[in-house]
Image (cartoon, rainbow, N blue to C red):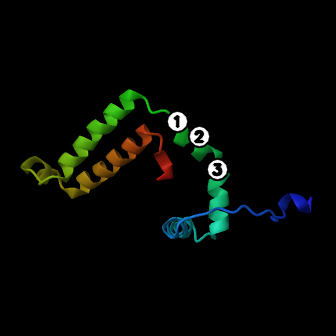
Amino acid sequence: MVEDTLRNQIVRVRLTPKEKAQIATAAKKAGDLSLSAFMRNVALSIPVIEKQRQVVPQVNRQLYYQLGEIYRLLEAQPNRDLALVGSEVIEPLKQLLVQVRQDLLGFGDEL
C-alpha cells in the first residue's frame, strides 16, 4: 500500500530558462506549489486536457467576436449615454462580457 503513494519515479523535462520561469510563476499563483507538485497537478488533470482539445462551434466564435466588439465600445471614449449609467454598472457588465466570452470558447472557470 505504501508503494502506491511513494513518489520515487523521476520524469525529466527539458525547458528553456524562460519556460521554467513561467511555470514557476504559475505554480506560485496556484497556491505556492513546488514545480513538481504544480506540473504533476497540471499533467494529471484530464478535464483540462479534454477542454483544450474541444472544438469550438462557429456560432460561438461569431458571438465571441461580437461580444468583444461590445466590450471595446464600453472601453472606448465615454459617451453621453454611458456616462449617465455610471461605472458601477459598466464595470460589472464588462466583467460579465469577459466571462461569457471565455465560456463560449470552453475556458469558463479555469481563467
- Which residue sits at x=47%, y=40%? 106
The three-letter amino acid code for the residue at tag 1 is Gln
The residue to which callout 3 is attached is: 45
Which one is nearer the viewer's eye here, 62 or 35? 35
> Seen in the image, is 49 located left or right of residue 103?
right
Instruction: Tell me, for residue 79, which label it has, or none.
Output: none
Q: Secondary structure at mark 3?
A: loop
- Which residue sits at x=27%, y=55%? 91
Instruction: Tell me, for residue 54, which label it has, or none.
Output: 1
On screen, residue 6 above or below 91: below
What is the spatial separation of the Cα atoms under label 2 and label 3, in whole angstroms?
Answer: 9 Å
Of mark 1 and mark 3, the one earlier in the sequence is 3
| Residue 64 locus on image (x, y percent) | 33, 38
On screen, residue 46 above or below 62: below
The residue to which callout 2 is attached is: 50
User: Which quadrant would residue 100 be assigned to in this image?
Assistant: top left
Which one is nearer the viewer's eye here, 22 or 18? 18
Which one is nearer the viewer's eye here, 96 or 67? 67
Which one is nearer the viewer's eye here, 14 or 23? 14
The three-letter amino acid code for the residue at tag 3 is Ser
What is the spatial separation of the Cα atoms under label 1 and label 3, in whole angstroms?
Answer: 15 Å
The three-letter amino acid code for the residue at tag 2 is Glu
User: The N terminus appears in which quarter of the rendering?
Assistant: bottom right
Disc 2 packing (10 Å; few <14; some 14–19; many ≥20) = few
| Residue 57 locus on image (x, y percent) | 43, 29
> Seen in the image, is 84 located left or right of residue 102?
left
> Are discs 2 and 1 less than 8 Å apart at CB?
yes
What is the spatial separation of the Cα atoms under label 2 and label 1, in whole angstroms?
Answer: 6 Å
